[in-house]
Image: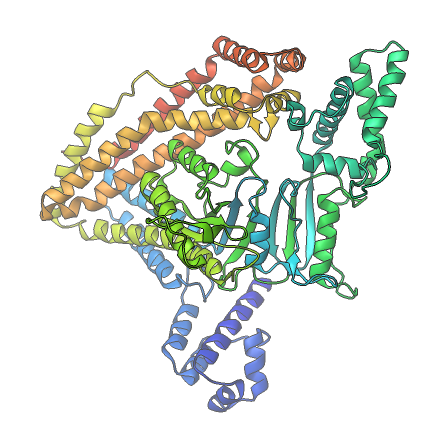
Amino acid sequence: MDTDLAKDKELGRELARVREAAGLTQAELAGRLGVSQTVVSRTESGERQLQGDRIRDFADAIGTKEAKVLEARRSRDWSKLKRPPIGHPNHDLLWSAELKLRELKTLLSQPDITQAFARRIEALCREIDTAAAELLKRECDLVFIGKIGVGKTSAICQIAGLTASGPDSQRPSPVLDVGAGRTTLCEVEIRTGPTSIVVEPCTDAEVRAHVADFAEKLLRAINDGGERGGSQDDQIMSREVERAIRNMANLRRPSTRRTEGPRTPDPARELARQIFEEEIKRSKGEQDVTSRLQFEILSRMRTDRRQRHDMHWDQDARADHRQWLKSEFHRINTGNNPDFTIPKRIRVFVDQPLLSLDGDVEIRIVDTKGIDETVARADLERHVGASHTVLVLCSGFNEAPGTEATNLLRRASEAGIKRNELQGVVLGLPKFDEALQTLDDAGEAVASIKEGYGLKTGVVEETVHQSLGYRNFSVRFFNSHEDNPADVQQDLSDCVGKVFDTYRCTVEELVKSAEGLIANYEDEQAQEIVRQAAVLIRSWIKRNKRLGSAMRATERSLLSEVESVHPASIHATMRRKGGWYNLDYPHHLAYGARLVVSSVLRSRMRDFAVLCDTFLEADEQHRPAEPLLSQARRALENASQTATERAQLLGETWFHDTLEEEDEFWATGMQRWGCGAGYVNDISTMNKSWFSENGELNEKMKSMIKREWKRAMKVVEGMLEDD
């Protein structure tokens, strides 16, 4: 019943849309139908059910081509694919895929079908089914990535209309917390829905690790006799987390706004000093001091009472929903709400579309935690190459596209993610009059902001499109304090459209491939061309069946990252057994595993593509072989993708099964901290030694890649008819 009701409401909405597009009022349509306006109103609201004849009556009364299309779509009976909504923009293409699946299934039942041809049909059916499912989805993530302090959160709020006007403010301010950097505590996801905030909390173990970092920072400052500004201890923990812990434990530093009188001491430092002196008098060691301080801070935080995960705006309350969001988000983000612990992820639901041009697409905006050291982070790279995703790479105006963006894109390419599969925007965020300071080729300052944007766009496009090869990225500049967000909104909407265009093209290609397969079935001349192509493929398989034994070490990426990150990040990950966001051991092993697959298979995939293109372009009469060659290419690409995914999983699983349990390894790394110079070199040596003694991961990688490649060869050979 619920499904039928949903269908009625869906049909009603579409009827209302096509009626309005035809320029008819409900009363005018009711007059043409000979019914009351109430009947039309109830039908469009989904309260009144329409059967086939009545749908036809409505379509005839509206009298437009669009109304006739609506009637035809409603009458379709889906048996192979999931029925798309009537208003789905690719409804007709999905119907073509449905019909082709039926034809392929019918062809598969013919008694004279060979086993090789049947395998091709079955494989193509699976491809169509998978591609259609991706096209059917109407959702997309806009993922904003940029370094700390670049201004991406302010830009998000202006682009999405998430601003609130206060009684004392001259202009609306962002709903989310903004500042000069190090403001957002964790990743924030913004979605459309009833106004509310949902928090995914840190686990107890994660909270304890954060408190341990804080306690260590306090005690080291005491031991060193003062602040260690600019030292490695400032990197032990993020300022955002420290701020939250201080607020939760009521250990806030006094305000520095006062200019007269003695400076009020830091209560957290005083607590640490008191505990340190008491424990030393009792002849306790450093570990006892640290443990007691951690316990005292945790006790003050009262995490046992912080069990709430969500809160919702009360429509009956006096507070405006945006002001409520601004206030409550700030309290949660800074640790000032006594019901919430430290968040790992915050989801903000707003009762408005996030893009004015998003149509029926469900848009989610993801504000990632700012980059303060490296882009090689699991929380960032999990978005790169994800389906239904647009990347928004934020940078300052002068440094656009930014080191962070270029490094992220280079790593994606190295890991085997195809450049044409990524859609996005390089978003430069100028401040003040930076654009006006741009110099033209003559060395003269530009005459307008628009001219400055134009000159800088050319420079950024040269880097992104030509040097990096990512042509699906547009370039846009946006001053969130001055510029109208309409152009950026349009760019983002265009990118969302291109995401679905990619899936649409895939389905169109597969439908065309199915047509060719069916057309060639009884054509003897076409079958001869296909046999020639099969001989070519067999010859290539024979040359490439065996993979070389030389492969790069899976841990190479991790070892390189350890040598480049801040020493405090190494210390933080040692405390968490490899799980620190700026140096995540399982992520780097997974990424390293992807690099292994890419280095081994990329050249072979490229060679096979050249072979297929050369055969097809040699003679127009070779076109009947296109369905087979395309299908073989997709089979190898799918095998490469499968190997990549298995490698990534293997790297992560092996870490959790093996290295994570090496308590002595992590304890040794912890003990080395604070023992003088050479810390990074010592940890690097320790890592290399451990991986040298435990090399089974690389052996498993070699076996897995060879197994997947052998399976791919078998799949392709299975598509080829005997000579």
Viewer-proximal residue among 463 and 459: 459
Residue 244 in picture, x, y percent from top left: 74, 38
Residue at image location 86% in from the left, 34% down from the top? 262
Residue 346 in picture, x, y percent from top left: 66, 46
Q: Quadrant of the N terminus?
A: bottom right
Compared with residue 305, is residue 321 higher up or lower down, i.e. above or below? below
Residue 299 in picture, x, y percent from top left: 85, 31
Viewer-proximal residue among 174 and 144: 174
- Look at the image and tell me whether residue 54 can be seen: no
Residue 389 in picture, x, y percent from top left: 47, 48
Q: Toward which corner of the image does residue 82 lie, by quadrant?
A: bottom left
Q: Toward which corner of the image does residue 669 lie, by quadrant?
A: top right
Residue at image location 14% in from the left, 33% down from the top? 535
Numbered disc total:
0
Viewer-proximal residue among 616 and 101: 616
Compared with residue 125, is residue 5 higher up or lower down, i.e. above or below? below
